Image: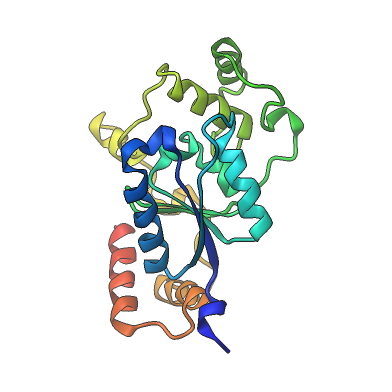
Amino acid sequence: MNSHHARPLAVGLVRADVSGSSALEHAAGLRRHAEGLGYQYIHTVRPPHDDRDPVGYALGIAAGLEVAALIVWDLETVGHTPSRVCEQMDLETVVPPETWAASAYVHRDPGHGYPAQPLTELVARHIMQDHLTCRATRCPRKAFAYAFLVKEGKIVPPTSSPRERAAARGLEYPALDELGPALPDGVDLAVLVGVLGKLTDPDPDPDLEAARLDRSVAGQR
């Protein structure tokens, strides 16, 4: 079988209003990043300048091509709302290099879905108040309102992780085993990383796999 066609497909999104004069550089960077991750990069989406929803425009094309991932330069490209992309596919950012995995969780309550009408600052603030206890990663409505307020300059996204913010305030942060279910019996981190690696690369480089495992283990400490 031709391994070129066995690789998962990916498209990139470059927005002129975000990338500006760096648009060509960013487009080339998306392709390099995608191919470095093992994707078959097939297209760079450039929404029209007057499109009111450039992220939705890109997602429509990506869904039609049945790609596995959308590649962007940074979270600003998707309005600081990775959850919107992850309802359909993986999101890969170049800066910083992170993977936002497609979520198996989709909120079925329409009251938590994306707003049907364009937002205003007042409506976005009301949504944030009404959905105060929701997590933006699981509530598309809150995520959309949050992204709108970020774009309007009303919210400044944190640059540190929840663990770093807790440490700065002298607060304890839950251990990893308190944040989610443990691995299944008989499966350790090495096995898990190996399986995940083979999903995208049936013939992985042993040295690269060892380095990836070292990084994964270090991240659990």
Q: Nearer the viewer, residue 6 or 201?
A: 6
* Position of 26 relative to 213 (above/below): above
Picture colour scheme: rainbow
For the N terminus, the quadrant is: bottom right
* Position of 25 relative to 107 (above/below): below
The reply to whether residue 88 is visible in this rendering is no
Left-right relation of 2 to 221: right
The reply to whether residue 109 is visible in this rendering is yes
Name the residue rendered at 57%, 61% in the picture: 68
* Position of 20 relative to 27 (above/below): above
Left-right relation of 138 to 187: right
Residue 197 x %, y %: 45, 74
Work out which residue is located at the far top of the displayed protein and give it: 122
Residue 41 x %, y %: 48, 64
Name the residue rendered at 55%, 66% in the picture: 9
Quarter residue 48 falls in: top right
Name the residue rendered at 43%, 32% in the picture: 17
For the C terminus, the quadrant is: bottom left
Residue 55 x %, y %: 56, 39
Q: Nearer the viewer, residue 100 or 95?
A: 95
Quarter residue 127 falls in: top right
Name the residue rendered at 34%, 64% in the picture: 216
* Position of 111 relative to 183 (above/below): above
